[in-house]
Amino acid sequence: MGSGIYLDYQASTPLDPRVTEAMAPYWTEFCGNAHSGEHAFGWAADEAVEDARARVAGLVGADPDEIVFTSGATEANNLALLGMARAAAPERRKVVVSAIEHKSVLAAARALTEEGFDLTVVPVGPDGVVDRGALASAVDSRTAVVSVMAVNNEVGTSQPLRHIADACDEAGAPFHVDAAQAMAFLPIDVVGTGIDLMSLSAHKCCGPKGVGAIYVRRGLSPRPRPLTFGGGQEGGLRPGTLPVPLCVGFGEACAILERERAKDTLHAAALRDRFLGELRRRLPDVRVNGTMDGRHPGNLNLHFPGVEATLLLNALQPHVAAASGSACTSGFQEPSHVLRAMGLTPSEAACSVRFGMGRFATEADIMRAAELVASAVADLRLAGAA
C-alpha cells in the first residue's frame, strides 16, 4: 500500500488480503459466465455469484433475491432515483433529497427536473443532521421517491432513518437510502428500519472497486424502471454479464464485515479520538465539522482556520493521504456543498480537510500523521504571515 500513511478511508478502503484470495480463482480457473446455464463452468460461476449475493443480503437483513448487483453505489443511486421516479404514478411528481447527499443522488434528482419533476432539497443543521420537521413537511402524496443517505461521506454524520421511513410510509412514498458509508460500522436491518431501496458499495468496506448493489424490497410497487436494456439479467433491473470475481470479492468483504465490524468500529474510533487529541494538543484552534454523536467512527472533518485545504494537502504529499471533500468531486475547485449546507462560509469550507481511518490504519500511523499535519499547518501559517 506504499510508504505513505493512508487516511482517506471514506474515498476508498484498502482491499483486504482475504478478499484478494477469495477472488483469485475466478480470474483464471473458474472462467465461466454466470449466465451460461448449459455447462459446468457456467454453473460454477453462477453458484459463486449466488453465494456472494446471499452474503451481501445477510449483512443488511435482506433476502438474496432482493439484492441486485451493480457497478457501484453511483449506479445504484441513479437506478433508485431515476427508476422510481419514472415508474411513479402520474400524480407523484416530486423528488425529495437532503442537502448533503452524494453528488450521484443530487445530480440524478436534478436531472429529473428536466423531465417535469419538482425537486425539494431538505436542509440540515450545523450538526450535519437532516431537519426532521422540514423533511416531514416535504414528503406528501405527490412524492415519487425520497433519498437520504445513512452516513454522510464527508462529515460522517448519521441520519434518523427510522423517523424518515415513518414519514415516507405515512405518505406512501418509497424511501431510498445510500448506505455506502454506513456499511463499515452501522448495522442496518432494512426490514426493521423500513427501507425500500438501498445502495451499497464494495470498495467502502475493504472489497474491490467496480461492484456494488441495490436492495429492492420484495413487494415494492411500483418497482424501479431499468436504466439499461439487454438480456434481462438481475431481474431485468440491471442487464449485462456480471463480473464474477468482483461479486465474489464483495461477498467475502461482507462476510468479513459481519464477523469483524464491532472490532473494526472500536479500532477506528480509538484511532480517530487519538488523532484528534494529538492535533488539538498541537493546534488548539482546530475545529470538528459536524456532530460527534453517532458519527462514523473513522471520520474526522476538521477546520484549520486560515489554512487552505488544497495547500495543506499538497504540503502533506507524499506522506499523508487525506481529502478536502468527496473523491467524486475532485478536480472541482468549489467549496464542499456538504459543509456549505451545514452553515460554513466558503472560506471556512475551503479550510477544511477530511481524514478517514479504518481496519488497516495503526496507532503509529496516527501519531506520525498528527505530527506531520501540525507541522504543515504551522509552516503554512508562518508563510502566510511573512
Image: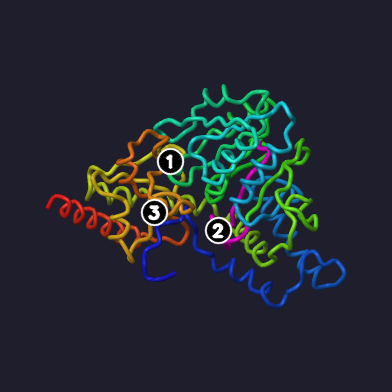
Choose between 24 and 69: the one closer to the eye. 69
Label 1 crowd bin: few (<14), some (14–19), many (20+), radius 10 Å: many
Residue beneath disc 2: 203
Considering only vertical position in the picture, is 339 above or below 384? above
State the SS at label 3: loop
How many discs appear?
A: 3
Q: Which mark is residue 323?
A: 3
Closest to the camera, between mark 2 and mark 1, is: 1
Mark seen at residue 337: 1
Of the two numbered discs 2 and 1 on the same chain, state the one appearing first in sequence.
Answer: 2
At label 2, the amino acid type is His
Of labels 3 and 2, the one closer to you: 3
Which residue sits furthest right?
A: 38
Dot 3 amino acid type = Ala
Q: How is the image coloured?
A: rainbow
Depth order, front residue of 139/295: 139
